[in-house]
Amino acid sequence: MNEKISFLKNKVYSDSPNKNIFPITTNIDKNGNLTIGGCCINDLVKRYGSPLYILDEITLRNSCKAYKKSLDKYYPGDSLPIYASKANSSLFMSNLVSSEELGLDAVSEGELLTALKGGVPNEKIVFHGNNKSDREIAFAIQNNIKVIVDNIHDLKRLERISETLDRNLEIMIRFTPGIECHTHEYIRTGSFDSKFGFGIEYLETLFKAIKETKFLNLTGIHAHIGSQIFELDPHKDLGEIMVNVILKAKYHGHIIKELNVGGGLGIKYTEDDDPPSIDEWIKTVSLSVYNTCKKNNIKLPKLMCEPGRSIVSTAGVTIYTIGSFKEIPGIRTYLSVDGGMSDNPRPITYQSSYSACLVNDPLGNSSKKRYTVAGKHCESGDVLFKELELGQCATGDLICVFGTGAYNNSMSSNYNRIPKPATVLVNNGEAEIIQKRESPDDLLKYDVLPDRFIK
């Protein structure tokens, strides 16, 4: 809990939101209780229930602004940060990133529709996916959304559907640059062995094939080398590789105007995490692209990047209510909460680690004890923390888990038919609901009992 004391007692925050464990507005009120966005968490739970997702608007906007500011600072050409909406997709998030002049990337018709309804201009949306359906492709084409081509199957169907609709389409191609990062095996997407993108060795054949199409116009290239990355050198290498791909495309008659380096910048989940700042990451990418373009006498392309986790994760927390305790003498004490793997599947899926504290004793001033924090689902592996140190606590107390803005809500499920939590936005002492809590009745909405079973 030393990190907590440093951040809250001394008010030491990094200018780069991804290097903070806590939302920027995290504080402790006069009664010693945790507050975020000027809102007392105890009051929020009384009003909106538990478990509860909370998003801090100021942290979100600061993250967006950090990307815009750094790109303007280090890259002399045109640029556009694009929010990777898979991290947390909603009408609110689409509207917020659009208001901060970011674009958005989507990987399904649902995410595309959410972006458009949320106010993101179609010219700032890119459509990803390694197995897009014809319906999704047609939706993108009809809404003038740029499509990132992931494979030959993609390319052939894009050509066919564009011709059927008699619509020209700007495309980007995604390729795997062969760069590996020291990250989790399941989220490493830029190596040669990846389900995403064209192998770099197929690009020249691909450039020739695209040149023969009637409706497709290749304007950009894309690569993404992983997630939760703490290294800068791989992105320096990526910029150089991508500019060399632009040269190959030019040889085959394609003028590449846009270069998209993907995302992947890590965040600080625990005291041991030390990611680069947004500024350092953007500087590395920008200078790599700029210097390689200058060396090869190439006009600077529009530089795009796709931050997701580093935009929204630190802005979000999840609040749980403590229920039962089970002490196994000499082994461990289980502390169970009213949520778990359905609202945060990352610990059981990726063995992900988080930081947490008691809402009524955030500094851990009372006598401390280690707990294994278990979820309420019918799975032995539904464990959020294996050895979490907390102050004295009891049934009914609240736990705040930090860094849950990304891939918690978006990957949540209704396992065990448990409804999904509500999400509230906090800012300047005001709280607003941005996603309603599901009810058990909501879970029956799409169930159908065949007529012959109805008496």
Image (cartoon, rainbow, N blue to C red):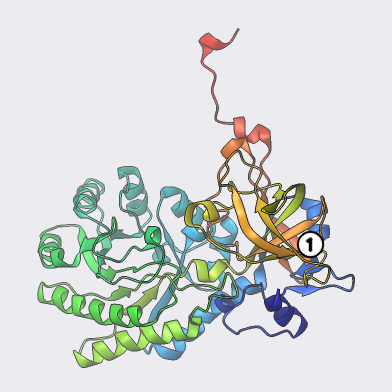
Residue 153 is at least partly visible in this image: yes
Q: Is residue 36 above or below residue 371?
A: below
Q: Which quarter of the figure is the N terminus placed in?
A: bottom right
Looking at the rendering, in which quadrant would you find the C terminus?
A: top right
Residue drawn at x 58%, y 43% as measured from the top left: 380
Return the residue nearer the eye: 433 or 374.
374
Q: Secondary structure at mark 1?
A: helix
State which quadrant residue 415 falls in: top right
Q: How many marks?
A: 1
Residue 406 at x, y percent in the picture: 54, 61
**For this view, does 142 lie left or right of residue 155?**
right
Q: Nearer the viewer, residue 72 or 266?
A: 266
For this view, does 215 lie left or right of residue 351? left
Type of amino acid at the residue the image marks with label 1: Ile
| x, y percent for residue 340 | 63, 49
Residue at the image position 63 percent from the left and 45 percent from the top? 420
Is residue 49 among what the camera can see? Answer: no
Q: Quadrant of residue 187?
A: bottom left
Asked which quadrant contains residue 399, the reply is bottom right
Residue at 79% x, 66% y: name it: 39
In depth, the one of 290 and 314 nearer the eye is 314
Query: Looking at this rendering, what residue extends furthest in the top direction?
Result: 455
* Image location of residue 200, percent across then percent down: 18, 67
Q: Dot 1: within a 10 Å radius of its alpha carbon, few (fewer than 14), some, or many (20 or more) residues?
A: many
Q: Is residue 93 above or below residue 23?
A: above
Q: Quick one: 393 or 23, which is closer to the camera?
A: 393
- Name the residue carrying label 1: 41
Q: Residue 395: give x, y in percent of width and height.
A: 82, 50
In the rendered image, the residue lying farthest to the front is: 330
Reply above or below: 238 against 287. above
